[in-house]
Image (cartoon, rainbow, N blue to C red):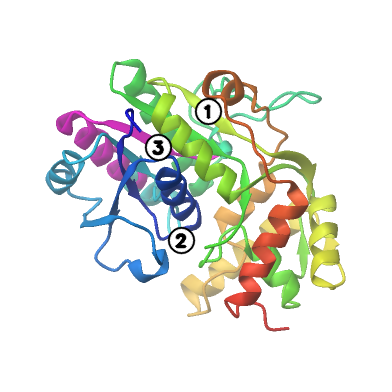
Amino acid sequence: MDDALHIGVIGATGMLGHHTARAALAAGHKLTVFHRRSSKLDVLGDLDFTPVEIDLADTDTLVAAFETVDVVIHAAAFYPTTPRPWQQDVAEAEQQITHFLNAVRRADCRGVYVGGAIALKTAPPGTKGRESNDYPSAPASKNPYLRSKWLMDRMVVDAGKRGLPVSVAIPAMTFGEYDYGPSTGQLITRLANDDLPGYVRGNRNVIYAGDAGRGIVAVAERGNRGERYLLTGTNTDMDTLVAKIAKLTGKAAPNAVPLGMAKLLSRWQAIKHRYFDGPLPVLTPTAIAVMSAGQHLSGIKAKQDLGFEAEVSLDDALRRAYAWFKAQGMITA
């Protein structure tokens, strides 16, 4: 194709990055995978790509890598993994996205940051979340995941408004193949393995990972600088989602638990880990943030500006993810 791009993907061994890499190739683009030294590139199978090792904490190495491509898609942005003071997580997030933005500027390429809808303020009751739902200032919450995602989103948008060619792609709650973590797929694997004691009620928008990958590539192709694009699928709620997964897996649906109870359990698990050498928390602050901040979303901007619409239904997305987890041996019960 005459307008083919050379796209570099950071985080291609993760679910969203993997589907983005596949979508880039399917659209006729050339692919480079920017990866950490520890990345397991064998999970990318038969994809046609050039591997380039990078260090997300070293601007100079990022510049050298970014100079080889037209656009960089950052699908491996920082998120908290272990309990520690929230300020440390936010500082690390700020440092990482600063390296990314500086490298895009010096390399004279374009950048797409893959963010999360949690960075947007919850829409008023009866309305859907949109890209314009900004927090007027830093959220009052001290949740490290929320504060990190908000800060990175704001920094990219602000840089774009100042002229840097960067955009933000925001996939909704995502299910699909290649979720080795697993990330959101834990809802499927833990329920299927009889290891999901409960869930927190709330609204959600769910998109198939393959559709999200196509949308992220569309942002790389046609997104405007300083703009966010919500990549959405089906508006639903956790009661419906858990019931669908229970039916799919043949398991009984767990009971819903109050958010306050989930927060107390999360704090207790963090205390046991930090002070009594306990295991890593299952209910992390990240999980609490995701559970408490869901909302219905509007994808009208991506449809109008990018021509993007999801194609795979919610039921089919869950079926595809479940089949992949089974094939990987991640569901054993």
Q: Residue under circle 3? A: 113
Q: Residue under circle 1? A: 229
Q: Residue under circle 2? A: 81
Height in image: 172 above or below 139? below
Asked if residue 221 can be seen in this view, the reply is yes
The secondary structure that dominates the magenta segment is helix
| Residue 309 in the image, given as x and y percentages of width and height | 63, 32
| Residue 247 in the image, given as x and y percentages of width and height | 86, 65
Instruction: Say which of marks 2 and 3 sits in front.
Output: 3
Disc 2 from disc 1: Cα separation: 26 Å
Question: What residue range appears in magenta?
Answer: 93-116
Disc 2 from disc 3: Cα separation: 20 Å
**Residue 176 image label:** none
Instruction: Say which of marks 2 and 1 sits in front.
Output: 1
Residues under numbered marks 2 and 1 in contact, where contact means CB atoms less than 8 Å apart = no
Choose the circle earlier in sequence order: 2 or 1.
2
Q: Residue at point 62% right, 24% down?
A: 130
Per the image, is 308 magenta? no
Disc 3 from disc 1: Cα separation: 11 Å
The image quadrant where one finds the C terminus is bottom right
Rendering quarter of residue 223: top left
Task: Give left or right: position of 51 versus 11.
Answer: left
Amino acid bearing label 1: Tyr
Rendering quarter of residue 27: top left
Q: Residue at point 72% right, 26% down?
A: 128
- SS for callout 1: strand
Per the image, is 98 magenta? yes
Height in image: 33 above or below 123? below
Asked if residue 265 can be seen in this view, the reply is no
| Structural crowding at the residue carrying mark 3, measured as other residues with C-alpha within 10 Å and reported as few (<14), some (14–19) or many (≥20) | many
Amino acid bearing label 2: Thr
